[in-house]
Amino acid sequence: MVVTLTEVMPPAVRTAGFSLAYSLATALFGGFTPAVSTYLIHATGNKAAPGLWLMFAAACGLVATLIIFRVRRTQPALRTA
């Protein structure tokens, strides 16, 4: 996914685009995981409930991957000089 994400970005903004996407994903799923996990355990009483959050994160990644490959297949390749 890392290679695909960098290849999707135009070369002129590749570094900024990749770092923004990576940082947002890390902040969202990495930063909020302890709070969400604690809430899920408290709300359900099940210590395995944080697995739901991990399944949600995995589903988001799968959907994003499928969308990127579908869009990439339908659009012509960008050529740069």
Image: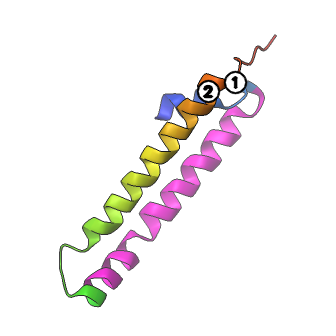
The answer to whether residue 55 is above or below residue 10 is below
Residue found 52% across the figure and 62% down from its top: 27
Task: Judge from the rendering whether residue 19 lies leftward or rightward of residue 80; answer left or right.
Answer: left
Q: Quadrant of residue 32?
A: bottom left
Range of residues picked out in magenta: 12-41
Please say whether residue 26 is one of the residues in the magenta stretch: yes
User: Tag 2: Cα neighbours inside 10 Å, few (<14), some, or many (≥20)?
Assistant: few
Indicate the position of residue 57 as horizontal and vertical percent values: 40, 57
For the C terminus, give its image quadrant: top right
Indicate the position of residue 56 as horizontal and vertical percent values: 38, 61
* Residue holding disc 2: 72
Question: Which amino acid lies under the numbered mark 2 shown in the image of this protein?
Answer: Arg
The answer to whether residue 38 is above or below residue 51 is below
Question: Which amino acid lies under the numbered mark 1 shown in the image of this protein?
Answer: Gln
The answer to whether residue 81 is above or below residue 35 is above
Task: Judge from the rendering whether residue 19 lies leftward or rightward of residue 65; answer left or right.
Answer: right
Q: Which mark is residue 8?
A: none
* Residue holding disc 1: 75
Real-space CA distance between mark 1 and mark 2, rounded to the nearest whole angstrom:
5 Å
Whether tag 1 and tag 2 are in contact, CB under 8 A, the answer is yes
Q: Quadrant of residue 75?
A: top right
Task: Judge from the rendering whether residue 45 lies leftward or rightward of residue 10; answer left or right.
Answer: left
